[in-house]
Image (cartoon, rainbow, N blue to C red):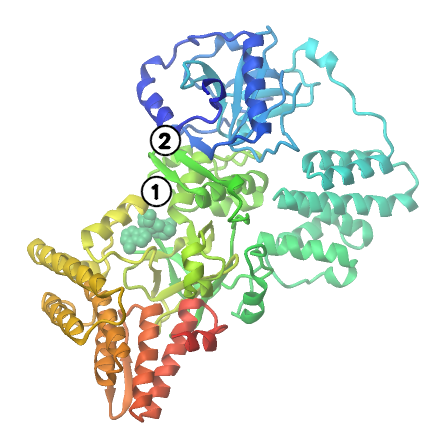
Amino acid sequence: MKNHRNTYEESPERLKDLVKNSADMKGQRSPSKPTRSGLLREHERHLKMLTDGSLPVKNMLLPLPYPPSRVSLKDSRCRKIRLEDLRIDCRDPSNIIVLRTIASPYIYSSTITAAEDEMGHVARLTVCNLEDTMVDPIIPESSILAIKQPCWSILVDGGVHIRVDHPSDLVILDGDEGTVPETWQKEVKCEEDKSTKEWKREGDMCFLKKRFRRALVCYNNGLHALDDSPSTNTATAIDLHRKKCGVNIVLLRLDDAAKDLAEAISLSNSSFQPSAVEEWLHNGSIDDPLQISPSIPKPLLELSSRIKFDLGIYQSAPHYDLPLLTNYVGPLSLHLDAPNYICDTEIRQTANHGRGVFSKKEFKAGELIAVEKAFVLPGYFIQDRGSDCLLYNLGNETAAQRPGALLFRELVQKLRWNGSLRGQFFELDAGDYDKDYSVGEKNGHAEDGVVDVFQIEAIRQRNCFSVPTRSIDLLNEQYNRHQEMRNGFWNHASYINHSCIPNSVRTFIGDIHLLRATRDIKAGEEITHQYISPEVDILERQEKYMGTWGFECDCPLCAADGCISKEARDQRLALFNELKAAVMRTGGQGPPTITAIKRIAKMTARLESLYPEDIYTNLPRLALVHPTLFLVEAWRGVRNTDKTIEFAFKLLRNFGIIAKVQSRKLEIEQQAGLINVESMRCLIYLKEGYESKGEGKLAEECLEVAKRWYGVVTGVSVGWEEFLRSV
Ligand SMILES: C[S@@+](CC[C@H](N)C(=O)[O-])C[C@H]1O[C@@H](n2cnc3c(N)ncnc32)[C@H](O)[C@@H]1O
């Protein structure tokens, strides 16, 4: 059994201990020196395990943070060192080491290989956060690499390896650079002499086999091998650029894809300069002043639309065919071609919550405030256990489940390859992460591909959303029980601050985020939403906000709860728990008895008395929500219409929605009200009640509000009739 332990997939627990206990080894030389045969034997064993398929969950690890090197290999500060010069955990940004890999890589949660320096000394090399695959390895055997700021990192088995966390700290060399040892230079093979046609064919084969990087090389070589006959060449060159563009899109290299497409378009119509086409692809607008789209062939048009949507297009009104988008989206089709609508909101400094999003115009309750396509929303088969992974951050001792881990991975890839998208992202809140490490464009360190993976993770943690495939699916209990939520990232929405009693609700259709007003909003008001639904107990909810986002909420509800003495709050919580247990006891054998309902109503009334009216005038009373919901449904179950109506109004009140009937008209005041599935359901119960009392008009008014709230809660009106039938 011992022989089969996978020491390549490091246990985070053991690594955490190691980080704590190895501080005193910092600066020392390697305690062990592997032999070439020992290292290769061990590597072979792990590779075999990988092909055998006996694989654990992927544990991705982020050690203690350190910044990526910004020293280029051509920089005069750059100093070449050897394996024997390396020290434990000592990174000097000016140092580089040139290595040659001596084995095929093991690619799982990271890329692991064996490498030698020019003295013939060997080491295990671990490169993390690469978009690497076994069919298309980035560093196959015999690759020549320069590693920036190399050092030894301790392994749990007592050995050491060179660990690279920032992908930009790894530079793959062609073999003819001055930094490459002479003996290795001679061994670098020249690419074969092939015709354009042959390169294209090989590129196509590689594409089919998902060897995307190799396909790019082949198409590039094909372009270089073009002969001098212009007539046949133009069509071939357009085709090769188009193919390259497609591969770059798959690899999330949108900037490169735009370059290739611009070349292809310009070749197909010489009145367009490549630079003008590239600018059009990047301009974020639906406008096409040069009239490029009507003048290009369909395949190029399709690619241009793909690139423009992925880079972000903006429109000035919330015009969307939401039923169409809703019906299109499914677990395998998350990504939509939809423009953003964010122009009626703006990002500004708040008084004491950092930056926030503000309305630039009035919004009516239910109206769309903003619509945004995801910057990144990983698409993967939820059921695919092979994509299971966890991301351990040893710096702040947090662990992200698969949705967060996969989002992190894709963020790194997208940011690394698209300089045009970096500036926006690195402006976002990274919490306590030391901004001095930052290499975002705003700091003027836009060296190609240099992104700080620790900063990306800090930004992800603070700003990502947990999302269903579509928010309407959350109304379906089956879905709720079985579906894992994904993690996605939306740049504009990342500026929205939290409030426990917000004025907007966020919903999703695939990768589209919709924000709707829960009540009328004035121009200039700050837009808020709930990061998570607030816990009943203020201390518990503040702990959660502090734990994940580092803030203490000071919304009116938290201020009110803060006015209540600890003793009274404890009393409230004890009664709340007692009620919860009493409600649980009624479950099981048929509907609750009238005696049980009355007992719970009495306890609920006692709990209500613990909410002073002068403090909670129109604020939600969270502890009362669930018992009151139980009572509404229980009275409805025994067909007591008057009681159902009475408790439905109480439930709305407990959500902070002050509703009453005045002169046989429904009046609703919801400045601090929580609009959610339960409050919407409550209105449907009221509609039913009034219907059975022959109050048709009141019933209709309740239904109208319920329908508006359905739009807020799901983002769309699709499925309303079906939902109504299911209540
Ligand atoms: C998603 S960002 C929101 C935008 C952020 N204010 C900014 O300047 O980038 C989340 C961060 O905003 C701040 N924040 C959000 N809601 C807050 C609130 N109710 N009170 C205080 N700070 C808040 C916290 O620092 C939190 O980590």
* Residue 252 drawn above or below residue 271: above
Q: Which element carries disc 1, helix, strand or loop?
A: loop
- CA separation in Å, label 1 and label 2: 16 Å
* Residue at left offset 52%, top offset 33%: 129
Amino acid on which the number 1 mark rests in the picture: Gly
Name the residue rendered at 80%, 55% in the picture.
271
Image vertical order of residue 324 relative to residue 428, above or below: below
As drawn, the label of residue 527 is none
From this viewpoint, is residue 704 visible? yes
| Residue 363, visible in the rendered structure | no
The residue sitting at 51% across, 48% down in the picture is 383
Could you say which quadrant of the image residue 171 lies in?
top right
414 relative to 236 in the view: left or right: left
Q: Tag 2, which secondary structure? A: loop
Q: Earlier in the sequence, mark 1 or mark 2?
A: 2
Quarter of the image for residue 679 reads bottom left
Residue 342 in percent (x, y) is at: 48, 62
Q: Amino acid at mark 2?
A: Leu
- Which residue is label 1 attached to? 431
Q: Name the residue beneath numbered marker 2.
A: 394
- Residues at badges 1 and 2 in contact (C-beta under 8 Å)? no
**Would the CB of label 1 be found within 8 Å of ligand 1?**
yes
Mark 2 and ligand 1: say if the CB distance to the nearest ligand atom is below 8 Å: no
The location of residue 142, given as percent across then percent down, is: 67, 18
Q: Nearer the viewer, residue 677 or 81?
A: 677
Location of residue 218 by image quarter: top right
- Look at the picture and state if 189 lies above or below 589: above
Q: Looking at the image, is mark 1 or mark 2 nearer the viewer?
A: 2
* Front residue (pair 163, 221): 163
